Image (cartoon, rainbow, N blue to C red):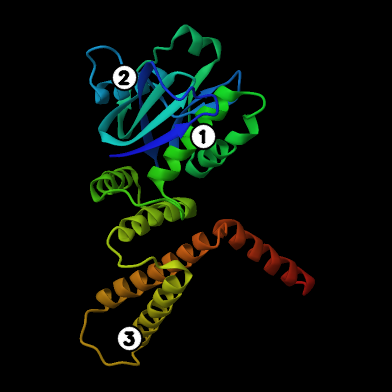
C-alpha cells in the first residue's frame, strides 16, 4: 500500500494528536458513490473515524453504510494519505469496495444538519469537483484540504496520465472491482478510465517510458494489424481459420487502435470526448451549409 503525505501551510512541524479515518471507493457503472451536503454543496468520499477495537475494514463498511445506506465489502486498504495541519496528523485509509446491498442510514446530528445524502455521480464529475480545491483557499480551508485529499486519492486510484505506478496487487483489486461492477455496455469516459488503469499496470513492467513516440509506434503497429484482419475478412488472403475468429481479431484490433488514441490524448492533455463532440459539430455545420 502506498502512502502519500499532504503538509498544510499551518503545520507546526510536529504533531501531538492523530486521527485515523477509513474511506470507501464505491463504483457502479460509470458512477462513484459520494456523500453530499445539500446545505453547503460539498461532496466527499464516504468514510469516517476509526472506533476503539474496530478493524479498519469494519470501520470503512460501517461508515459507508451509515452515511449512504449502501452495504459494501471492502478489500484491503489500497492507499494511505497522511495530512499534517497545526499539531495534528490525519490518517485516511482508502478501500476499494464492492456494493452488495442496502440498509437504513444512521446520520450524526451534524450530518443531519447539513442535509447529508448519498449521491452517485460520474467519476469524471467527482474528479472535476475535487480538482477545484484551490478555489476555496481564501474562503474555506477545511473544504480546500478535504477536496485536495479526495482529488489526490481518486487520481491515484482511478488512473490518469500523470499517476505513478501502483503495485500489481493494488491494480488487481481495482481491476476486479471494474469487472465486478460492469454491465456489457460502457460509457466513453468509463472506457478511458479503465484503459488508464491498464496503462499504469503496464508501466510497472515496461523497460522505458513510452511517451508520445511509443504510443505512435504502437498505434502504427495496431493499424497494420487491423489492415491485415480486414484483408482476411474481405478474402484477399486465403485462410483456413473460422470466420468467427477473424471477427474477434478484427474487433480486438479496432479496440487496440482506440486505446492508443486514448493514450496519445492523455499524453497531450486532450479531452478526447469533448474533441469528438466538437469535430462532429464542425461536420454538422458543414453539412448544413450544403443543405444536407
Name the front one of labels 2 and 3: 2
At horizontal 24% and vertical 16% (from top left) the residue drawn is 54
Of pointers 1 and 3, the one earlier in the residue sequence: 1
Q: Residues within 10 Å of mark 2 (few under 14, many from 20)?
A: many
At horizontal 31% and vertical 60% (from top left) the residue drawn is 202
The label shown at residue 62 is: 2
Q: Is residue 228 above or below residue 86?
A: below
- For the residue labelled by badge 1, is the local secondary structure a helix, a strand or a loop? helix
Label 2 – label 1 distance at C-alpha: 24 Å
Q: x, y percentage for residue 30?
A: 44, 44
Q: Residues within 10 Å of mark 3 (few under 14, many from 20)?
A: some
Q: Is residue 205 left or right of residue 155?
A: left
- For the residue pair 68 and 63, the one nearer the viewer reads as 63
- For the residue labelled by badge 2, is the local secondary structure a helix, a strand or a loop? helix
Q: x, y percentage for residue 235?
A: 33, 90
Q: x, y percentage for residue 206?
A: 30, 65
Q: x, y percentage for residue 216?
A: 45, 75
Label 1 – label 3 distance at C-alpha: 52 Å
- For the residue pair 121 and 23, the one nearer the viewer reads as 23
Quarter of the image with the N terminus in it: top left
Residue for badge 3: 232
Quarter of the image with the C terminus in it: bottom right
Residue for badge 1: 148
- For the residue labelled by badge 3, is the local secondary structure a helix, a strand or a loop? helix
Of pointers 2 and 1, the one earlier in the residue sequence: 2
Amino acid at each position: 500500500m502506498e502512502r502519500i503525505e499532504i503538509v498544510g501551510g499551518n503545520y507546526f512541524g510536529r504533531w501531538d494528536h492523530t486521527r485515523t479515518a477509513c474511506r470507501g471507493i464505491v463504483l457502479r457503472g460509470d458512477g462513484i458513490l459520494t456523500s453530499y451536503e445539500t446545505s453547503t454543496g460539498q461532496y466527499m468520499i464516504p468514510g469516517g473515524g476509526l472506533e476503539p477495537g474496530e478493524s479498519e475494514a469494519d470501520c470503512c463498511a460501517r461508515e459507508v453504510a451509515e452515511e449512504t445506506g449502501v452495504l459494501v465489502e471492502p478489500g484491503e486498504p489500497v492507499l494511505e494519505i497522511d495530512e499534517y495541519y497545526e499539531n495534528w496528523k490525519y490518517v485516511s485509509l482508502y478501500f476499494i469496495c464492492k456494493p452488495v446491498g442496502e440498509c437504513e442510514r444512521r446520520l450524526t446530528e451534524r450530518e443531519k444538519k447539513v442535509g447529508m445524502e448519498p449521491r452517485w455521480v460520474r467519476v469524471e464529475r467527482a474528479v472535476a469537483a475535487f480538482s477545484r480545491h484551490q478555489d476555496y483557499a481564501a474562503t474555506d480551508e477545511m473544504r480546500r484540504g478535504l477536496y485536495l485529499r479526495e482529488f489526490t486519492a481518486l487520481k491515484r486510484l482511478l488512473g490518469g496520465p500523470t499517476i505513478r505506478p501502483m503495485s500489481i496487487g493494488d491494480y488487481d483489486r481495482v481491476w476486479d472491482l471494474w469487472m465486478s461492477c460492469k454491465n456489457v455496455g460502457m460509457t466513453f469516459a468509463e472506457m478511458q478510465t479503465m484503459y488508464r488503469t491498464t496503462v499504469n499496470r503496464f508501466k510497472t513492467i515496461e523497460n522505458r517510458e513510452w511517451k508520445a513516440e511509443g504510443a505512435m509506434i504502437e498505434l502504427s503497429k495496431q493499424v497494420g494489424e487491423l489492415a491485415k484482419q480486414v484483408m482476411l475478412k474481405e478474402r484477399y488472403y486465403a485462410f483456413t481459420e473460422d470466420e468467427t475468429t477473424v471477427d474477434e481479431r478484427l474487433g480486438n484490433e479496432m479496440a487496440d487502435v482506440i486505446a492508443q488514441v486514448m493514450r496519445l490524448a492523455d499524453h497531450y492533455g486532450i479531452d478526447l470526448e469533448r474533441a469528438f463532440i466538437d469535430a462532429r459539430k464542425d461536420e454538422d455545420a458543414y453539412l448544413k451549409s450544403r443543405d444536407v
